[in-house]
């Protein structure tokens, strides 16, 4: 993983880093019932109609190429695929990549008002 800090056109400092998932981290099996043979799982599926709804195209985010993350406080953005030579880009070029990146919702654990409990 490469890591950079840069300053945007408004004078704000951002962190940029690349994320490339390892092959073993990506799902490559049917996790509903991993003990069931593939033939039985296929028989259960309705091939004429897929009940799952895909919004936004997850393939654009998770792939072999990975993505470039931009963070500043609770603001996060992702750009996929990772631009070549981004580690040598100027601050202005990184800011242009940041502006082209998709905003990402903060996770519920990082939301204000949620505190950690001490056991």
Image (cartoon, helix red, strand yellow):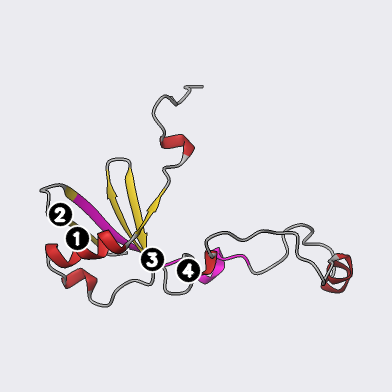
Which quadrant of the view contains residue 18? bottom left
Q: Earlier in the sequence, mark 3 or mark 2?
A: 2
Tell me the element at label 1: helix
Q: Nearer the viewer, mark 4 or mark 3?
A: 4
Q: Which residue is mark 1?
A: 95
2 and 1 marks in contact (CB < 8 Å)? yes
Classify residue 61 as left or right of residue 42.
left
Give the CA separation, mark 2 to mark 4: 25 Å
Q: Which residue is mark 3?
A: 67
Q: Earlier in the sequence, mark 1 or mark 4?
A: 4
Residue 53 locus on image (x, y percent): 66, 59
Residue 84 locus on image (x, y percent): 27, 77
Tell me the element at label 3: strand
Tell me the element at label 4: helix
Q: Residue at x 16, y 48 (%)?
A: 13
The residue carrying pointer 2 sits among few (fewer than 14), some (14 to 19) or many (20 or more) residues within 10 Å by Cα, namely some
Task: Confirm whether the magenta stretch covers residue 79.
Answer: no
In the drawing, what numbered circle is on residue 8?
2
Tell me the element at label 2: loop
Task: Confirm whether the magenta stretch covers residue 19.
Answer: yes
Give the CA separation, mark 1 to mark 4: 21 Å
3 and 2 marks in contact (CB < 8 Å)? no
Give the CA separation, mark 2 to mark 1: 5 Å
């Amino acid at each position: 993983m490469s890591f950079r800090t840069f300053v945007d056109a408004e004078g704000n400092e951002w962190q940029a880093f690349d994320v490339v998932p390892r092959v073993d981290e990506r799902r490559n099996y049917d996790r509903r019932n991993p003990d069931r043979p593939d033939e039985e799982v296929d028989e259960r599926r309705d091939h004429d109609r897929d009940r799952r709804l895909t919004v936004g195209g997850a393939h654009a985010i998770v792939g072999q190429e990975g993505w470039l993350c931009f963070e500043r406080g609770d603001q996060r953005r992702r750009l996929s695929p990772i631009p070549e030579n981004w580690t040598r880009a100027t601050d202005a070029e990184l800011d242009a990549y940041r502006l082209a990146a998709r905003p990402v919702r903060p996770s519920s654990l990082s939301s204000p008002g949620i505190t950690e409990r001490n056991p």
